[in-house]
Amino acid sequence: MRLHVADHPLITHKLSVLRDKRTPSPTFRNLTEELVTLLAYEATRNVKTVPITIETPVTTTQGVEIARPAPLIVPILRAGLGMLSGMTALLPTAEVGFLGMVRNEETLQPDIYAERLPDDLTGRQTFLIDPMLATGGSLIAAIKYLTDRGATDVTAVCLLGAPEGVAAVEKAVDGLDVTVVLGALDERLNEHGYIVPGLGDAGDRLYGTV
């Protein structure tokens, strides 16, 4: 597994506003979209392309275009939906699938309640988006869903991660082509499985249901 933790002042600034408990939901949503676009720039550094010939106003030259089949973006519901527009802003030709997961607050493990994915993901670059990499349970289950359908190149984009979650994912995906892109790697998980210092429950703060 490859881990990339973003190091950019704009990302740090936007994360600081997201962390602030006084930030209202509309501002939180807008900043999340902006932040994800910045993280998507890093996450798509190795997106597959093919060479093409184009005509400029001056001459003929070589360029590239996104390879087929198109990349697949998979938000983990519900909080991942708040990151979708930020990803599609940078990858407008990508297709979108959905994976509905909810954390069991007693076991801290994910329960899958819905999915909308292509049956065959062979040869598809896939981008999982979920705001928080806490225990790693949801991300591990989501990666397994994708790889079971043939995906061999999975990139996860998260606003924040905890060391415990990163370690759990790394152990679980050993031997798979997986990249994790984080806006920041925080200190730890607390006894309730929340990231510290974190930003609280991302879904609640995105949708105003605190």
Image (cartoon, rainbow, N blue to C red):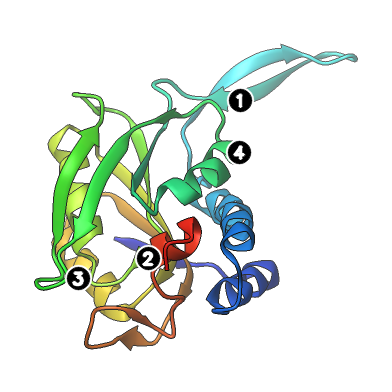
Q: Position of residue 192 (x, y in %)?
A: 23, 82
Q: What's the residue type where badge 3 is placed? A: Ala
Q: CA distance from mark 3 to mark 4?
A: 30 Å
Position above or below: 105 against 188: above
* Residue identifier under label 3: 168
Q: In the shown orientation, is residue 169 left or right of residue 61?
A: left
Q: CA distance from mark 4 to mark 1?
A: 19 Å
Q: Tag 1 or tag 4, which sits nearer the N-term?
A: 1
Q: How packed is label 4: few (under 14 Cα within 10 Å), some, or many (20 or more)? A: some
Position above or below: 45 against 121: below
Q: Do labels 2 and 1 touch, CB within 8 Å?
A: no
Q: Tag 1 or tag 2, which sits nearer the N-term?
A: 1
Q: What's the residue type where badge 1 is placed? A: Val
Q: What's the residue type where badge 2 is placed? A: Met
* Residue identifier under label 2: 132
Q: Position of residue 152 (x, y in %)?
A: 25, 39
In percent of the image, x 41 and y 75: which residue is there?
Answer: 200
Q: CA distance from mark 4 to mark 2?
A: 21 Å
* Residue identifier under label 4: 89
In percent of the image, x 25 and y 25: which residue is there?
Answer: 118
Q: Nearer the viewer, residue 90 or 85?
A: 85
Q: Position of residue 12 (x, y in %)?
A: 62, 74
Q: CA distance from mark 2 to mark 3?
A: 14 Å
Q: Nearer the viewer, residue 201 or 75?
A: 201
* Residue identifier under label 1: 64
